């Protein structure tokens, strides 16, 4: 209980001390503006009698402070004409002027509030999504124009952009609550949605729309402001369409071609095979895993000294974006099996990331619009 009473005792002593030793007060304080960038302070002081009457006294040395809405100091000095960095303040941001008169061993202070100028942000942007057909990847470029309302007028004037902050809010149409936020740290950047919060929910609704309707509408809302007061200033949208089977089959073929090159590099001699045959036996795309499962076979022959034929077959597993590629051996002829055991530990060979589609084909047969 002592601990709870202590602040009240300290407060009582402080108030009593002030009542006994603070006979001065601010009798008048005016903060006048001639424009958005300057304020003129007029202040007067008075001595208070025990009965409460006030007698004007000469103005003592004063210090004028200007604070922003976060109580960061924008100005501190003795000049009564105070510069206001209005261009760097938010839209109608609350500001605070405090004036302190310095008497002998006593400071007497008073405050007045004011507002920064009304401001607005216009944005122009270029958004590319999905990037290369990958619904996790995209890129954007953004340019901002900051304007403030002219002093005592309704016209808008462009000012130098200050520290504009912002982000993209991305969601499947109809599921705004399950959105992903892309922090905007640069005017131009690429992004990967899979590494951001709430991506699992976003991905679920995206895949659901593709399964049910073969297309999904993804919306991008651009929010911008001056450090915490972001509002929506622009928007964009992109239609994602489910890839037709012929495109999937082409991608499977590209994966097999690239995988066979790397597999042969591991299994053949320095001079390489004289003849090579690569077969894509069957393939499937697992929607829930966004992964290809491809049954393939490689046959190659060497003419060094005499003809020798090697044959291996197995399953190529690779994600839609070409990552996490691996080949799992299932069958081989005797020469192929011997060569595999000699060059590879176990039945699985991990491969480098593969390219989903050549850029030229991707640009001609892109499965998105927007």
Image: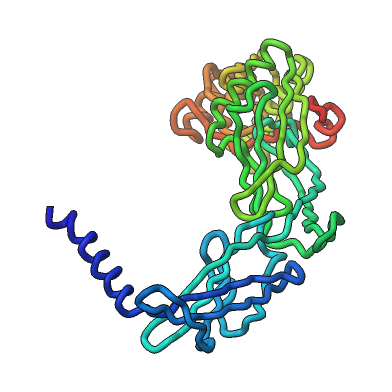
Q: Is residue 211 left or right of residue 178?
A: right
Let me know if residue 41 appears in the view.
Answer: yes
Q: In this view, does 114 lie above or below 357?
A: below
Please state, as top left, top right, bottom left or bottom right, where the C terminus lies in the image: top right
x%, y% of residue 54? 47, 78
User: Which residue is at a point 63% across and 76% down the rendered structure image?
Assistant: 41
Q: Is residue 329 left or right of residue 192?
A: left
User: Which residue is at a point 66% across and 34% down the rendered structure image?
Assistant: 170
Residue with the most extreme top position? 212
Q: In this view, does 355 lie to the left or right of 12?
A: right
User: Which residue is at a point 50% across and 75% down the rendered structure image?
Assistant: 26
x%, y% of residue 166? 66, 49
Along the viewing direction, whichever of 12 and 195 lies nearer the viewer: 12
User: Which residue is at a point 32% across and 74% down the rendered structure image?
Assistant: 18
x%, y% of residue 310? 61, 24
Along the viewing direction, whichever of 340 and 206 lies nearer the viewer: 206
Q: Is residue 109 above or below residue 335?
A: below
Along the viewing direction, whichever of 35 and 359 lies nearer the viewer: 35
| Badge count | 0
Let me know if residue 267 appears in the view.
Answer: no
Image-quadrant location for residue 313: top right
x%, y% of residue 320? 65, 27
Q: In this view, does 174 lie above or below 117?
A: above
Image-quadrant location for residue 147: bottom right
Q: In this view, does 123 lie above or below 116?
A: above
């Amino acid at each position: 209980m002592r601990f709870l009473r202590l602040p009240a005792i300290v407060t009582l002593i402080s108030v009593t001390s002030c009542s006994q030793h603070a006979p001065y007060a601010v009798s008048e304080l005016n903060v006048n503006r001639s424009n958005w960038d300057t304020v003129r302070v007029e202040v007067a002081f008075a001595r208070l009698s025990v009965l409460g009457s006030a007698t004007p006294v000469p103005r003592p040395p004063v210090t004028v402070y200007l604070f922003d809405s976060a109580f960061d100091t924008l100005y501190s000095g003795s000049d009564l004409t105070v510069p206001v960095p209005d261009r760097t303040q938010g839209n109608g941001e609350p500001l605070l002027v405090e004036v302190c008169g310095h008497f002998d061993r006593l400071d007497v202070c008073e405050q007045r509030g004011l507002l920064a100028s009304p401001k607005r942000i216009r944005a122009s942007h270029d958004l590319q999504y999905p990037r290369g057909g990958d619904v996790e990847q995209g890129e954007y470029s953004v340019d901002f124009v900051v304007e403030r309302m002219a002093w005592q007028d309704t016209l808008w004037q462009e000012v130098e952009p200050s520290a504009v902050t912002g982000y993209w809010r991305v969601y499947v149409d109809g599921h705004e609550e399950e959105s992903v936020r892309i922090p905007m740290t640069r005017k131009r950047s690429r992004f990967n949605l899979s590494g951001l919060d709430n991506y699992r929910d976003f991905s679920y609704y995206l895949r659901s729309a593709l399964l049910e309707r073969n297309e999904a509408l993804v919306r991008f809302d651009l929010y911008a402001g001056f450090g915490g007061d972001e509002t929506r200033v622009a928007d964009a949208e992109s239609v994602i369409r489910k890839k037709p089977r012929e495109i999937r089959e082409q991608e499977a073929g590209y994966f097999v071609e690239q995988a066979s090159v790397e597999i042969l590099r591991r299994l053949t001699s320095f001079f390489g095979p004289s003849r090579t045959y690569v077969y894509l036996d069957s393939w499937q795309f697992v929607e829930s895993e966004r992964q290809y499962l491809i049954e393939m076979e490689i046959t190659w022959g060497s003419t060094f000294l005499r003809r020798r034929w090697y044959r291996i077959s197995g399953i190529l597993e690779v994600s839609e974006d070409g990552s996490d590629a691996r080949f799992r051996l299932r069958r081989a002829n005797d020469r192929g099996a011997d060569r595999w055991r000699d060059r590879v530990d176990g039945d699985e060979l991990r491969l480098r990331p593969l390219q989903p589609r050549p850029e030229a084909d991707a640009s001609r047969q892109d499965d998105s619009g927007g």
